[in-house]
Amino acid sequence: MSEPIGFYEGRFYMLSNFSAHQVVYEGVRYATSEHAYQAAKFSDLVQREKIMQAPSAFLAREYGQSLDGRVESFDKIGVIKNIMREKMVQHDDVREALRATGDAEILKNHPDDDGFWGMGPDGSGQNNMGKIWMELRAEII
């Protein structure tokens, strides 16, 4: 197996939810996959619209931290996997980057990660986003 590949910065940044790739998810166009994920957390249409209109993925994430108007029993792994699949299907460069990872372990290596989606600050995180990218890679290789 090859050396692990991180996607916080550098050549594989397009695997990040913050990369500048629009995503159509459930018939709605979002500026980034982060916008789509954060909006999906809410049943409240005002909150969803605020997130959709956020001028950056960072602000979409910030707006998505609200607890008001959330979807009950939100399946965060299932939702993000569907959004990431849509991003992969809709963008050739994302598919090619994913293929270029070969058989390497894919790591979400953001230094401020909470350890659920990525490796966390000490490297002991669950790396769920990296695991999802590896699952999706298996679908196209």
Image (cartoon, rainbow, N blue to C red):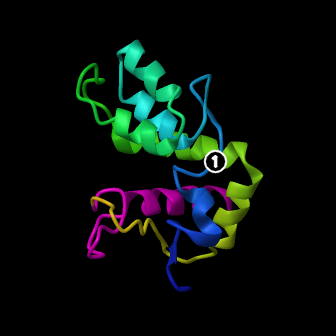
Q: Give the vertical position of 101 relative to 15 (above or below).
A: below
Q: Give the vertical position of 29 relative to 128 (above or below).
A: above
Describe the element under mark 1 as helix, strand or loop. loop
Q: Nearer the viewer, residue 85 or 110?
A: 110
Residue 132, image x, y percentages: 47, 56
Q: Give the vertical position of 88 relative to 131 (above or below).
A: above
Residue 68, image x, y percentages: 24, 22
User: Furthest residue to the right?
Assistant: 92
Question: In this rendering, would 15 be left or right of 129?
Answer: right
Residue 120 lies within the magenta run: yes
Determine the image quadrant of residue 59: top left
Which residue does the image show at 26% across and 76% down from the upper left?
Answer: 122
Q: Which residues are magenta?
A: 115-141
Q: Examine the rendering and report whether any part of residue 94 can be seen.
A: yes
Query: Mark 1 = which residue?
Result: 20
* Neighbour tally class for label 1: few under 14, some 14-19, many 20 plus, Cα within 10 Å: some
Question: In this rendering, would 137 be left or right of 123?
Answer: right
Which residue does the image show at 29% across and 57% down from the upper left?
Answer: 116
Determine the image quadrant of residue 130: bottom left
